[in-house]
Structure formats: C-alpha cells, structure tokens
Amino acid sequence: MANLARDPGQNVDGIYALTLLSNLYAPPLVTRPDAWTVTVKVNDSGSDEPDFLISGPGNIAFDRRGYAWVTNNTFQGTPNSSNFNLVFKPNGQPADGRNRTPRSPLTGGGVLGGGYGVTIDPHGSVWFGNFGWGDCKGCDPSRNGNGSVSRFTRTGMPISPPDAYQGGPVRAMGMASDAEGNIWISSVGNNSVYVFKHGNPHQSVRFDQQLGSRPFDIAIAADGSAWVSNGLGPPPATIAKYALVNGALVQRFRHLLGDQLRGIALDSHGNAWVASQGDDLVYARGPDGATIGSFNGGGIKQPWGVTVDGEDNIWVANFGPLELTSDFTGRLTKLWGVNAPPGHNVGDPISPPTGYTVPTAGSEVLLHNGEPLYGPTGPPCFIPMMRQTAVEIDQAGNIWSINNGSPISPSTPSARILAAMGSSFLSGSQRRLLPKSIEIAGERGGSAPRA
C-alpha cells in the first residue's frame, strides 16, 4: 500500500492481474489503468441554478483553513463572462457560510470573468483578477470586459466596489501576494506588471513591458522579487524578474524562453519552473535566470499549470492540443525536481508516458444537476478529465487539478464541461479512481506543499 501511494505507476500490470482473480468488487475495471490512484470528483458549486453551475474554472488558491478559492470563467452553456467565483471546504464540498466561513458561489465585488488570477494576502483577504470578455448578464455595459481586480474578506464578503477596482490592470491574469502584502498582477491588456503596495489599489506602481508581451503568471521568490511569464499570445515569449526598490518596480532581467508561456512555480532552491504551451515543454531556470533545462516526458502535452511539492518534485497540468479532437484524455504529469535520487536526472518523468489520467470505468460524465456534459442532444462523454489549467497542493498533500475546458468542438465552450473534475483531489503522490459507482473517494497523505 505504501508503494501504491508513493509510486502509483509501479507494477501496474501485475496489480491489474490480481484484480481479475476475484469478483468481490463490481463492476471491475475493464482495461488496465496507467496508474493506481484515487480521485475525488468536485463539481458542486453550491447551487444548481443554471447561472451558478461550475463553468470553466481557471485557477485555485488555499487559505490557512484549507478552504479552496477558485476562479470561474463563464456562465454554463455560454461563452460569456460569469459574475461569480467558487469556494470549497477542505473536503471538496461547497463552502456553506456557517461559522463565519464563505458561501459558494461567491458573488459581488465586481467579479467578471475570473481567469488565472487568485491569491490570498497575509491578512487573509482573497484577491481575484477579472479577465472579463463577452456579455455579462446584469453587469454594467460600460465596463466592456475591461478586466479589473476584486477583493473579498476571508468570510466571503466583498471589499472591492460593485464594479471592482478599476483604472489599473486591464485584463488581469496571474496574481501573487508577497510577505509584505503587496499584490502583484500581470496585466495582459496593456502588457504591464502592477503592484498594489501593501494591498492598496490606490497606491500602485507599474512596469510597462515590451509591446505584445502579454504577461500571464507571477510567482514570488523568497527575497520578495517576482518572476513573470510572458507570452499569452504569439511569440516572442519571455521570462522576467522584478523587484520593488524604493517603491518602484525594477526589472532584474528578461530572457527569451519557450512559446506561449503559462504557469510558473518556484522550488525550495529558488529555481523557476515554467509551462510552455506552444512547444510542449516545461523549462527550469536558476534564481539568476541561468538555464537548467527543458523537459517533456511523463505525458506532457501543451502544459499550462505547474506546482512544486514538498519533495521538490514538479507537477504539471496539461491543457492538451489546441486543435479540436474528441479523443484527447486530460492528464497530470509528475517530474523529478532538483532532488532527483541516484539513477534519475532532474526533469526525468515519474508519471507514465500517458500521464496520470482519470478513466470513468463506464460512467457518463454529467454536470452536477444531472445533465449530460454536452447537453441532452449532444454526444455522451466518457472522458472526465479534459483540459487542465492549474494544479495546486493543499496542506494535507492532496493534488487539486482544475478541469477548465472541453476539446471536442467549438460549439461546446468551456462553460459546459466542468463535469467530473471541477477540482480533483489526487493525493500528493497520486491515487486511483475507483469503479463507476464511486464518485467521491479519497485518501489523504503525500507530500504537502512547502510553507
């Protein structure tokens, strides 16, 4: 059992053969899995009203209590910006507002089309970036999807005004809080990096990057400096590092790197690991920007999100091919980090060539209200985990993976697809999905994230 927890891809064939010796548990797995993991499906927003079903979540952050705060892109069944985000208890149930806790779905504060931006400051306030696009039911049309920043208390009460904090970031994307409570924001719409000094949106500083840089994600180093991945759009893509010096933003360096950079995470040595969607690679750079390497094993396919566990190993959320396909299976990748044991190199895959996947064992993917994933007239879906955008680790060492979009057709926007995995718990060292009648199953443990 310990080996299953630590290395779920080991001896898969032999263990599968053992499962065929008895029919004690039914129905049995009909095909050999790629690894033995237990997955918990989370697809309940807290409301089954059509306008509040989970709809293309983007990113996730955990507060000190282990509550998960998740950005939500769209209204279910439409390509339009939603006006709510999500909050889950540590066990994956929607937050219910009891005992001064937040209630999901989370509304107010000017939320509009949450993208990749969510962070929690040292005082417990939760910040969301509003990417904003399309129409928004009940929203002020003058906003025109401008993008902005919203802020909530730890109990889920909005602090930002009804139209959010305007006049700064445009199309806010990645966000991060440093130890001083400064809020760092990547602003896609004007190719800039912003900092709300000590969390005050009215005291912000800005660094204008090159035209077309389109910054995506931000990660804070131990010394308070910030790494920024650039390249949401066409090349060139770059990685940059900034510091607050005497109240102003200073660029430490900027290097060409990869193609369409996405998520970024730092290990315990200060090395930056960056997902590069356009060339199917994960890059590693030293604290000074020096090259460590680029890696593509373990099922990496157009990676998007990256995180580092307590053993300095790397987890990768894979978005998958941009071209439309009906057979892409979402997967998570795990790589050896800088503490690779003898016989392994930095960046070698731990996950199998398929990545860690989540088969259904025959159950059709349904929304929480019971509707089929693609609607009553659409084709049935048997692929629970699809396009992954973010992966994070909670205080217990569980992996939460964000299932954002569907690869099947342009008429099936990401809003329709959050079925079997809104956020999936897979432990810090993966576990296996149980047979089809099991929807919620799990096991705690694994390597918790580094404080």
Image (spheres, grey):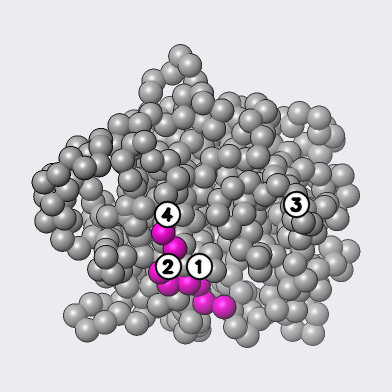
The answer to whether the residues at label 1 and label 3 have Cβ atoms under 8 Å apart is: no
> What's the distance in space between the residues labelled 2 and 4, CA to CA?
10 Å
Q: Residue at x 70, y 65 (%)?
A: 120
Q: Is residue 450 magenta?
A: yes
Q: Amino acid at mark 3?
A: Arg
The residue pinned by badge 3 equals 98
Mark 2 neighbour class, 10 Å CA radius: few under 14, some 14 to 19, many 20 or more: some
Q: Earlier in the sequence, mark 4 or mark 1?
A: 1
- Horizontally, residue 433 falls left or right of residue 353, namely right
The residue pinned by badge 2 equals 445
Q: Nearer the viewer, mark 3 or mark 2?
A: 3
The residue pinned by badge 1 equals 396
> What's the distance in space between the residues labelled 4 and 1, CA to CA?
12 Å
The answer to whether the residues at label 1 and label 2 have Cβ atoms under 8 Å apart is: yes
Q: Nearer the viewer, residue 403 or 219?
A: 403
> What's the distance in space between the residues labelled 3 and 2, CA to CA?
27 Å
Q: Which residues are magenta?
A: 442-451
Q: Residue at x 71, y 54 (%)?
A: 128
Q: Residue at x 46, y 30 (%)?
A: 366
The residue pinned by badge 4 equals 442
> What's the distance in space between the residues labelled 3 and 4, CA to CA?
24 Å
Residue 214 found in image quarter: bottom right
Q: Secondary structure at mark 3?
A: loop
Q: Amino acid at mark 1?
A: Ala
Q: Amino acid at mark 4?
A: Gly
Q: Is residue 439 magenta?
A: no
The correct choice, above or below, for 97 with respect to 392 in the image is above
